[in-house]
Amino acid sequence: MNTTISENQSLVLIVDDEPFIRAQLRLSLQREGYRTVEAENGREALTLFQQLQPDIVLLDAIMPDLDGFDCCTQLQSLENGPSTPVLMITGLEDQESVDRAFEVGAVDYVTKPIHWPVLRQRVKRLIQQSHLQQKLEAANKELQRLVTIDDLTQVANRRRFEEYCAQEWQRMARNQLPLSLILCDVDFFKAYNDTYGHRAGDRCLQLVAKAIQQTVNRPGDVVARYGGEEFAVILPTTYADGAIHIAARICEAVRQLTIPHHTSQANTCVTVSAGVATEIPVPSSDFQEIIDAADRALYQAKTKGRDRYQQ
Ligand code: GH3
Ligand code: MG
Ligand code: MG
Ligand code: MG
């Protein structure tokens, strides 16, 4: 094992059982400004890969202990394995070996004796391509977050709510299971803004969203900002008693925030009203049904005095 570090340069993992080949690769890559690290068999390569997360792997095929093909296969199941390019460098020129190399996940293949100017270009291109790919994936992930998350409260936004509600409605219909929905609305929130200011109002919504989020615990439960000061909680595979229990916990959790609200006619602190609906969807029905039912229940909670839940 031999490591050479020079700052800010891509790290190349050189895997070959021949010390002479490793030395040649090391010298030629270092001349290009790369950092290099060396392994003399597949097993050592897997350990180094996990420790150092190289930008590219140059992999020999025939090696004792663990050969290049098996090493490449195992690399694919490691963290960052599939996104790290593997370039096979081998004396094997037969079609079967070439096919096998690509099948196990190599992205390129060069044969020995090494043609150095070609290798230099291949390494450069493969690293550039993989860095570009990583940037695109990160940008995609961020984009996905931006289109599904509410900026102010960091819970799911209306778009995500509609999408998830429709999806779970159909899934529950297929399996004849109950879907529950809770709609929550902050009480006298217009008065809150008028009394404490719009910025305090925003902060209040953030705290309420967090409190609601903390009352749900199953992985399929989704909290969303449904409108200005309205939140929705989607509870798949949940019967009415379970949903009512959560609605009670939501009302209590918001009360426990003890955010002063002296112009509320329901309490001296910020409260929410909640409407609960549960349905086992009839196939080919519309998920708008359960939203309307929860909305009707919410309206009742409001007219009965607010700071409460209603089924
Ligand atoms: P009720 O108890 O019947 O729900 O009364 P309410 O005052 O809460 O209901 P109303 O619909 O009259 O007012 C909702 C208020 O929520 C008005 C609106 O300005 C405020 N609001 C909506 N979105 C936001 C937001 O993002 N930030 C802040 N600060 N206020 C918001
Ligand atoms: Mg070899
Ligand atoms: Mg409202
Ligand atoms: Mg309101």
Image: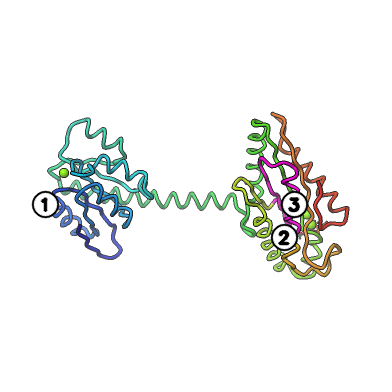
Q: Earlier in the sequence, mark 3 or mark 1?
A: 1
x and y percentages locating residue 134 in the rendered image:
40, 51
Label 3, secondary structure: give it: helix
Q: Is residue 231 magenta?
A: yes
Which is more toward the observer, 235 or 292?
235
Q: Earlier in the sequence, mark 2 or mark 3?
A: 3
Residue 253: numbered disc: 2
Whether 301 is among the magenta residues is no
In-front residue for pair 203/272 = 272
Q: Nearer the viewer, mark 1 or mark 2?
A: 2
Q: Which secondary structure lies at badge 2? A: helix
Q: Secondary structure at mark 1?
A: helix
The residue drawn where x is 79% and y is 70% is 195
Residue 20's disc is: 1
Please name the residue shown 22% across and 42% down the image. 67
Q: Position of residue 87 (x, y in %)?
A: 25, 44
- Magenta span covers which residues? 226-252
Label 3 sits on what residue type? Ala
Marks 3 and 1 close (CB-CB < 8 Å) = no
**What residue is shown at x 64% (from left), y 59% (from top)?**
153
Residue 138 versus residue 63 in the image, above or below: below
Q: Amino acid at mark 2?
A: Ala
Dot 3 alpha-carbon crowd within 10 angstroms: few under 14, some 14 to 19, many 20 or more: many
Residue assigned mark 3: 247
Q: Looking at the picture, how far across and down is residue 89, in whole percent?
A: 20, 43
Amino acid type, residue under disc 1 in the picture: Phe
